[in-house]
Image (cartoon, rainbow, N blue to C red):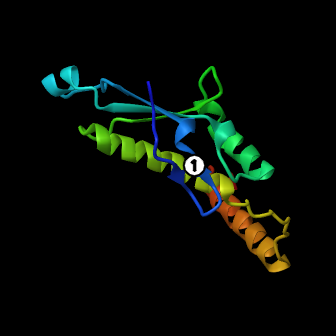
């Protein structure tokens, strides 16, 4: 494993310093013939979440919720990329995935306000249910006269 020196900048205030990133190149899985058997092009990028600079406590909590299933035993975020046959391109893709995760954690979720359907909407719903029930009743056997 090697430490990545270039930081990931999300906003002017939020960034992941290079010392918080460790990268390992491993062999990709799946088909690919000799190339996949010889070349370590898959990137395994690990991010120390505690070292991220500029995150508020609420954003840090949202980030933890987003990444809880992607943490290793040491509590670091694990991001992999094997989309490309090029190791440097896979590193760019993995860094972009981390940047998108952090950007999603920075967004404050909209507050849900409870609403009620209007009277007209309720009536339309009941009318639709009555029509459907009538249609189903008409499918039955005719009543004896």
Q: Position of residue 4 (x, y in %)?
A: 45, 38
In the depicted structure, whether residue 116 falls above or below residue 103: below
Q: Residue at x 74, y 65 (%)?
A: 130
In the depicted structure, whether residue 136 falls above or below residue 72: below
Q: Residue at x 25, y 39 (%)?
A: 86
Q: Is residue 55 left or right of residue 84?
A: right
Rendering quarter of residue 125: bottom right
For label 1, the SS is: helix
Q: Position of residue 117 (x, y in %)?
A: 82, 71
**Residue hosting label 1:** 101
Residue situated in front as seen by the camera: 116 or 6: 6
Q: Is residue 134 left or right of residue 97?
A: right
Rendering quarter of residue 26: top left
Rendering quarter of residue 30: top left
Q: Position of residue 71 (x, y in %)?
A: 61, 29
In the depicted structure, whether residue 29 falls above or below residue 125: above
Residue 33 in view (yes/no): no
């Amino acid at each position: 494993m090697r430490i990545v020196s270039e930081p990931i900048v999300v906003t002017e205030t939020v960034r992941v310093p290079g010392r918080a990133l460790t990268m390992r190149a491993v062999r990709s899985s799946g088909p690919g013939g000799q190339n996949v058997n010889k070349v370590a092009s898959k990137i395994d990028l690990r991010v120390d979440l505690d070292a991220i600079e500029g995150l508020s406590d609420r954003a840090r909590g949202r980030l933890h919720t987003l990444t809880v299933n992607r943490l290793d035993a040491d509590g670091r975020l694990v991001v992999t990329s094997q989309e490309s046959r090029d190791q440097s391109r896979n590193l760019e893709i993995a860094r972009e995935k981390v940047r998108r995760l952090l950007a999603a954690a920075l967004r404050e979720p909209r507050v849900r306000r409870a609403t009620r359907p209007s009277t007209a909407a309720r009536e339309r719903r009941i009318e639709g249910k009555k029509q459907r029930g009538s249609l189903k009743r008409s499918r039955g056997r005719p009543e004896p006269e």
